[in-house]
Image (cartoon, rainbow, N blue to C red):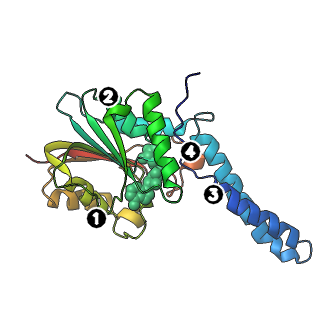
Amino acid sequence: MMEKVDYGNWVSVRFVVVPGILGLLLAVWAVFLPYVGIPAGVFSLVSLYFLHARYQFSPRGRDVQARVLDQVLTRLPSGSEVRQVLDIGCGSGALSIEAAKRYPTAQVVGIDPWGRGWESSKRLCEQNATVEGVADRVLFVRGDAASLPFEDEAFDLVVSNLVFHEVRGVRDKKRLVKEALRVVKRGKWFVFQDLFGWRAVYGRPDALLGAIRSWGIAQVELVDTTGPARVPRALKLPFMLGTVSVLYGRKNT
Ligand SMILES: C[S@@+](CC[C@H](N)C(=O)[O-])C[C@H]1O[C@@H](n2cnc3c(N)ncnc32)[C@H](O)[C@@H]1O
């Protein structure tokens, strides 16, 4: 039987289980100490919220993941000049694999630290690439967006989807954008989707664009993608998809 791809869910099951268990334990405790009922209710609501969010993101639910990813795919450059592609924070490989399908002669590298159990996450990426028929041109490696293990100007196209805000230990997320741009060849492309509209993380959008231009990149656009991706109201919180935008452009020659 033909295996199916599994691109996972961007909302980890931990966000449902951990507050759910805490809510239950506190609810039992509240039988003896009624005021504990308040945190019990809060934890239970958090758990229910993330359960709903998982349903919204899932291909078996509202498939928001595919619609959001599509906002990157529609901005990929066309043409055969794309030979080397890097996908930063590749997750289960969805964007790396789509890029390999889009550019049939390109070599694609997907990089992610994957955390605990990283071997099975990497294996899942490889299985997905096999099912999609691109395993011979996609390489998945363990690595960190904060310090990419590549030389300057190594790639024709660098992409990343909803990763930079998740990178721990780097307060100034603009640094991650700068690091990603470092590995783009001169005259070549980048398409990054992240929570660029979340001011607590990235500051003002015009300041972000100003910083990127000051690094010598003249062609850069920032577009709010909440509308085109039809982000449901429940996911419009800033740390979910309420501030999602695509930053794309081309490095100066
Ligand atoms: C919301 S998921 C998106 C995954 C993938 N880009 C996609 O579109 O399906 C965020 C990803 O960022 C990765 N990530 C977290 N910290 C990272 C880091 N320091 N460097 C690279 N990726 C990281 C996570 O492991 C996870 O796969």
For mark 2, what is the residue?
102
Between tags 2 and 1, which lies in front? 2
Residue type, numbered disc 1: Arg
Residue 154 shown left or right of residue 200 in the figure: left
The span from disc 3 to disc 4 (Cα, nearest Å) is 12 Å
For mark 3, what is the residue?
15
Mark 1 lies on a secondary structure that is helix
For mark 4, what is the residue?
9
Asked whether the beta carbons under mark 2 and mark 3 sit within 8 Å of each other, the answer is no
The residue shown at (24%, 59%) is 178
The residue shown at (30%, 39%) is 108
Which dot marks residue 120? none
The residue shown at (88%, 78%) is 33
Residue type, numbered disc 2: Arg
Upstream in sequence: badge 3 or badge 1: 3
- Say few, some or many: other residues with alpha carbon within 10 Å of mark 3 (under 14 / 14 to 19 / 20 or more): some
Mark 2 lies on a secondary structure that is helix
Does the Cβ of the disc 3 residue fall within 8 Å of ligand 1? no
The span from disc 3 to disc 1 (Cα, nearest Å) is 28 Å
The span from disc 4 to disc 1 (Cα, nearest Å) is 27 Å
Upstream in sequence: badge 4 or badge 1: 4
For mark 1, what is the residue?
175
The answer to whether residue 227 shows anywhere in this view is no
Residue type, numbered disc 4: Asn
Mark 4 lies on a secondary structure that is loop
The span from disc 2 to disc 1 (Cα, nearest Å) is 29 Å
Upstream in sequence: badge 2 or badge 1: 2
The residue shown at (42%, 34%) is 129
- Say few, some or many: other residues with alpha carbon within 10 Å of mark 4 (under 14 / 14 to 19 / 20 or more): some
